[in-house]
Image (cartoon, rainbow, N blue to C red):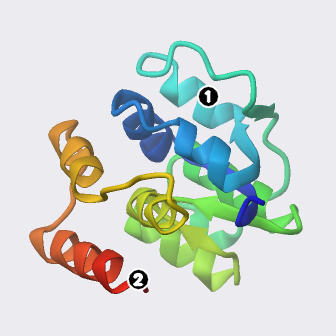
Amino acid sequence: MKPLDIGIIDSSSLIVLWQCDLIEVLRELFEHLIVPDPVRQESMRSVPQIPGWMLNHQANGTPPPCAAGLGRGERAVIALASITPGSCAILDDRQARACALEQNLPVIGTVGVLLEAHREGLLSELQPSLDAVRAHGFYLSDNLYRQVLIEAENGR
């Protein structure tokens, strides 16, 4: 049984999970994973082929006013999540996350995906995955890094 229903992913999470060979955790965590068309376009260089189990989706819905300063992919994720019942926006950008939360949308980031994968037994150890995303240029503060490892160890 998959713990989450529908994930709508932004390019930063898609790219780093692809580069770290961790993309399959998304397949195991989400019943459906949607890649909005603007995200697919933004990710093409780093993710040359979207896996067949991911659903490509034309952007529809209207982004809320708080999304005005965001990138096309982030706006598409928020707009699509706002009209897709049971969905979770997969966003890393702080402003995008704040906007999604302002719209009462469930939000998870790349680190949250990895933590959830660890909790579900998909990753036997979390630290190597966190190290891998950092090595691929994903910003993860030392404080958050330690905090997530403590959460994983405590089973929260």
State whether residue 25 is above or below residue 45.
Answer: below
Residue 43 left/right relative to 76? left
State whether residue 59 is above or below residue 117.
Answer: above
* Residue beneath the point at 24% across and 81% down: 150
Quarter location, residue 142: bottom left
Q: Residues within 10 Å of mark 1 (few under 14, many from 20)?
A: many
Labels 2, 1: front one: 2
Which residue matches tag 2?
Answer: 155
Q: Amino acid at mark 1?
A: Arg
Q: Residues within 10 Å of mark 2 (few under 14, many from 20)?
A: few
Q: Amino acid at mark 2?
A: Gly
Residue 3 left/right relative to 141? right
Which residue matches tag 1?
Answer: 40
* Residue 38 pos. (x, y %): 64, 34
Q: Secondary structure at mark 1?
A: helix
Quarter location, residue 6: bottom right
